[in-house]
Image: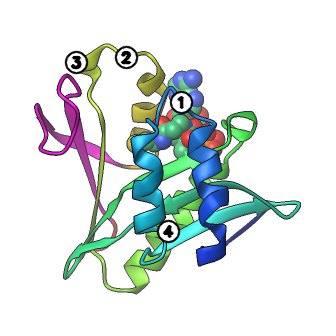
Amino acid sequence: MQIRAARTDDMESCVAVIAALPDYFTPSTHDDVRRELPTGPAWVAVAEGTVIGFVIAPRRFHAAAEITFAAVVPHRRGQGVGTALVEHALAALASDGVVVVEVKTLDASAGYEPYVATRAFWEQRGFVQIDCIDPLPGWEPGNPSAIYAQAIQP
Ligand SMILES: CC(C)(COP(=O)(O)OP(=O)(O)OC[C@H]1O[C@@H](n2cnc3c(N)ncnc32)[C@H](O)[C@@H]1OP(=O)(O)O)[C@@H](O)C(=O)NCCC(=O)NCCS
């Protein structure tokens, strides 16, 4: 497996990754990927010439970035691909001056089982929940947003 910077021609491969995860990503998010990937920064995990996962982490402020998308194709989940992508992204962001990284995900209060593993993933990667916002502007009603953050350098 190789992790590399995403290219514009990876766009539909990345959309295909989230299209394979309907329990996590609604079809309305597909155009979000098409909009965000070109400006990125974004990274893809590639195995045997196929994109098996990706991360998008745009800069929000001078020293802050947000991971807006992280996804791994279902048959490769739980094999370290997401960890490799996130570690690569955080190292690249840190070397570019980013100090704090945010992730928003579905809060535990939603009682939606698929996201139990997602929150465990972020917590194992060092992210700390700092808030729950409900409703979060731009999110569908009934989706309390867990706000996670991590300092990636002093
Ligand atoms: C979240 C995601 C990107 C992680 O990528 P991954 O390649 O599956 O994750 P890894 O194999 O690198 O890491 C697995 C970690 O996730 C957690 N995890 C995964 N499945 C889990 C489960 N069923 N129960 C509890 N924890 C679980 C564990 O913390 C595990 O850490 P460990 O290696 O210390 O045990 C991927 O699973 C995915 O695409 N999930 C669906 C989409 C999603 O939730 N995206 C994020 C939206 S905010």
Q: Quadrant of residue 63?
A: bottom left
Magenta residue span: 127-151
Q: Is residue 91 visible?
A: yes
Q: Is mark 4 within 8 Å of ligand 1?
A: no
Residue placed at 39% from the left, 33% from the top?
119
Instruction: Look at the numbered disc 4 and give the secondary structure of its residue.
Output: helix
Residue at 28%, 22% (x, y): give it. 108
Residue 75's spot in the image, x, y percent? 75, 35
Residue at point 43% right, 35% down? 26
What residue is disc 2 on? 112
Q: Quadrant of residue 128?
A: top left
Q: Which residue position is annotated with label 4?
A: 89
Quadrant placement of the N terminus: bottom right
Label 1 belongs to which residue?
A: 22
Residue 154 vs 151, above or below: the answer is below
Is residue 5 visible in the rendered image? The answer is: no
Which residue in the protein does label 3 denote? Answer: 109
Secondary element type, mark 3 = helix
Q: Nearer the viewer, residue 152 or 49?
A: 49
Q: CA distance from mark 3 to mark 1?
A: 20 Å
Q: Residues within 10 Å of mark 2 (few under 14, many from 20)?
A: few
Instruction: Confirm or deny contact between disc 2 and disc 1 (CB under 8 A).
Output: no
Amino acid type of the residue that numbered disc 1 sits on in the rendered structure? Pro
